[in-house]
Image (cartoon, rainbow, N blue to C red):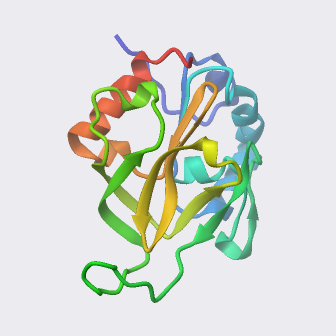
Amino acid sequence: QIDAHVTADPKVVRAADRVVFPGQGAMGECMSEMKRLGLDEVVCDTLGNKPFLGICVGMQALLTDSEEDGGTAGLNLIAGHVRRFPSGQRDAATGDQLKVPHMGWNEVEQRRAHALWHSIENRHRFYFVHSFYVSPDDPATTAGATHYGVKFTSAAAGEGWFATQFHPEKSAAAGVQLLANFIAWDGA
């Protein structure tokens, strides 16, 4: 039995056994609302102290800063930057222009073993919707990489936390498996 809550109440987040930090929309608005609600401090306090999963903008907000919205400071929990996909890129195989946002299914190359990859084949496809991608300063942070004109970190991990640029909740069976792995994960 899972007792899950969707909340913006810092007390509920602090009391949770594990935290999912989803994201949708723009980085500037996300950071502004987090600060207004006091969730920035809660995320900083919980990352690494209990199993933590960041998704999409929930991953990007963990980094130092973002190019989005004219430049937005992140939580700086992961040293690195969020960059916009360059315009005018072409698919190497087809020559087709790559559209921004990157929207649809794409492969994730697992770069290191992790409990959240359990029963998910390497290079499985997950669903993406984003115009910006994370670029951590430490390559060892990368748990999964994807190519869309540029090679980018599509999953990152550290002690007690895992974050994805893709949306597991939109990624069919592999996404359900990743979420089930998170529920079973003790953070080690």
Residue closest to the far left: 173
Residue 24 visible in the snapshot: no
Residue 143 visible in the snapshot: yes
Q: Identify the residue at horizontal 63%, vertical 49% (top origin).
A: 139
Q: Identify the residue at horizontal 29%, vertical 34% (top origin).
A: 120
- How many numbered circles does the render carry? 0
Left/right placement of residue 166 relative to residue 106 reads right
Left/right placement of residue 68 relative to residue 86 reads right
The N terminus, quarter of image: top left
Between 73 and 14, the residue placed more toward the observer is: 73
Quarter of image, res 172: top left
Q: Identify the residue at horizontal 27%, vertical 78% (top origin).
A: 93
Q: Residue 37: image x %, image y %?
A: 72, 42
Residue 125, compared with residue 150, is above or below; it is: above
Q: Identify the residue at horizontal 21%, vertical 38% (top origin).
A: 173
Left/right placement of residue 87 relative to residue 172 reads right
Between 77 and 109, the residue placed more toward the observer is: 109
The C terminus, quarter of image: top right
Left/right placement of residue 48 relative to residue 120 reads right
Residue 168, compared with residue 96, is above or below; it is: above
Between 178 and 93, the residue placed more toward the observer is: 93
